[in-house]
Image (tube, helix red, strand yellow):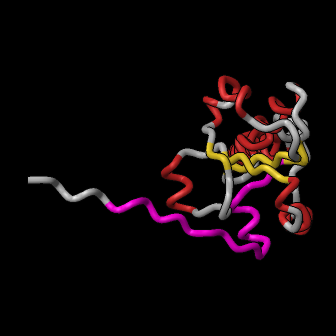
Amino acid sequence: MKRMLVTGIALSLLAGSALAQQAATPAAAEAAKPPAFKAHVLTRAEFDALLAQPETLLLIDVRRPDELTGKGGFPVYLSIQAADLEKSLAWIPRDRQIVTISNHAARAGKAADLLADRGFKVAGAIGAETYEEQGGTLTKIAPPAPKPATP
């Protein structure tokens, strides 16, 4: 009887360990997945080198306005939300290298792929928060003050 109890406890511990490993596996697999885009994710040094030649560069920030004001961005950029990018292609200049921007480069990478597929010169994608984590400085963007009510 004592042997069956010990065996039962051992099996319970093994089963619990196996379940814990199975629960951790999807998260680990998700983290190991390659990005869902082909665009090159720029490092801070690569991006800074591109910024040194502003006359050849166009920054397209695909984040929402609240993300820009909450997290910060870059001093000069074209703001086109990711969902509106495809219908805005006609007025995006084709004579400059394009860097797309989002918080951690996921949306920016997808936007860069869309632009590259449509014949634009895409240098890559960057995450504003990632850039800041690597020591880069973001410009904090303050929303405009509300207009006073007119009597």
Q: Which stretch is magenta?
A: 125-145
Kindly identify the residue that appears in the image at 89 percent across and 61 percent down.
Answer: 50
Nearer to the camera, 23 or 99 = 99
Kindly identify the residue that appears in the image at 75 percent across and 49 percent down.
Answer: 105
Determine the residue located farthest toward the left in the rendered image: 151
Nearer to the camera, 70 or 140 = 140
Horizontal side of 75 relative to 95 (left or right) equals left
Which quarter of the rendering shows the N terminus? Answer: top right
Horizontal side of 8 relative to 145 (left or right) equals right
Q: How many marks overall?
A: 0
Kindly identify the residue that appears in the image at 76 percent across and 39 percent down.
Answer: 26
Q: Position of residue 22 (x, y in %)?
A: 76, 39
- Magenta-colored stretch includes residue 23: no
Horizontal side of 29 relative to 38 (left or right) equals left
Q: Position of residue 16 (x, y in %)?
A: 69, 45
- Magenta-colored stretch includes residue 128: yes
Please indicate, yes or no, whether residue 65 appears anywhere in the rendered image. Answer: yes
Please indicate, yes or no, whether residue 11 appears anywhere in the rendered image. Answer: no
Image vertical order of residue 134 relative to residue 84, above or below: below
Image vertical order of residue 104 relative to residue 82, above or below: below
Q: Where is residue 117 in the image (x, y as percent from the top left)?
A: 88, 26
Q: Where is residue 10 in the image (x, y as percent from the top left)?
A: 75, 49
Kindly identify the residue that appears in the image at 88 percent across and 41 percent down.
Answer: 95
